[in-house]
Image (cartoon, rainbow, N blue to C red):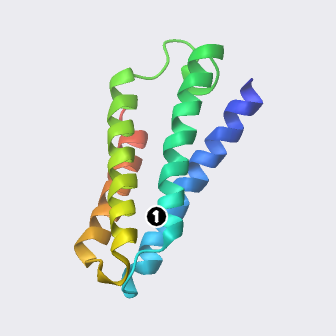
């Protein structure tokens, strides 16, 4: 079970890297890359699966007391906000504002900061 948990940790990290890198790369273009939405939704799904596996098998961050469910809830809300804002930005095509791209980038950074600094 620990191996499967680690696979989803990798998918989760890779998905956030895709969101972060894709948003930065698209800052000079008129549209937001479609891969950003795929990465955001992939991170949401992988995160939910990680919580399920961790709670079921007590592996990874869920050993001992486990992580705070408040932290997981905040991360889920922020991740859903990233995915929805990215989806809106992609649907706007060439008419997406830099502010919308900045919102995707800022929310992504917020999610990373919550993950790292909330103990």
Residue at 40% across, 87% down: 29
Residue 2, compared with residue 41, is above or below; it is above
Task: Identify the residue at the far front of this view.
Answer: 91
Front position in the image: 7 or 115: 7
Instruction: Where is residue 14? Give x, y as percent.
Output: 60, 55
Tell me if residue 54 can be seen: yes
Residue indicated by mark 1: 20
Looking at the figure, which quarter contains the C terminus? Answer: top left
Instruction: Estimate the x, y position of residue 109 in percent, counting from the top left.
Output: 36, 56
Q: Residue at x 42, y 42 (%)?
A: 116
- Whether residue 58 sits left or right of residue 98 in the image: it is right
**Between 47 and 2, which is closer to the camera in this rendering?**
47
Q: Quadrant of the N terminus?
A: top right
Q: Is residue 119 visible in the rendered structure shown here?
A: no
Mark 1 Cα within 10 Å, few/some/many (few <14, many 20+)? many
- Secondary element type, mark 1: helix
Q: Quadrant of residue 63?
A: top right
Residue 20 drawn above or below residue 50: below
- The residue that appears at 39% across and 37% down in the rendered structure is 76
In this picture, residue 72 sits left or right of residue 102: right
From what the image shows, is residue 88 above or below residue 76? Answer: below
Residue 79 locus on image (x, y percent): 39, 46
Q: Position of residue 84 (x, y in %)?
A: 35, 54
Tell me which residue sits at (35%, 41%) in the image.
114
């Amino acid at each position: 079970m620990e191996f499967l948990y680690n696979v989803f940790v990798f998918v989760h990290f890779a998905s956030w890297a895709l969101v972060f890198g894709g948003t930065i790369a698209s800052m000079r273009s008129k549209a937001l890359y479609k891969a950003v939405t795929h990465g955001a939704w992939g991170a949401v799904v992988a995160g939910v699966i990680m919580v399920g596996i961790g709670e079921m098998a007590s592996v990874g961050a869920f050993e001992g007391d486990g992580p705070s469910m408040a932290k997981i809830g905040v991360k889920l809300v922020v991740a859903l906000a990233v995915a929805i804002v990215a989806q809106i930005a992609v649907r706007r095509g060439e008419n997406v504002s830099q502010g919308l791209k900045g919102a995707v980038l800022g929310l992504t950074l917020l999610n990373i900061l919550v993950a790292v600094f909330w103990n």
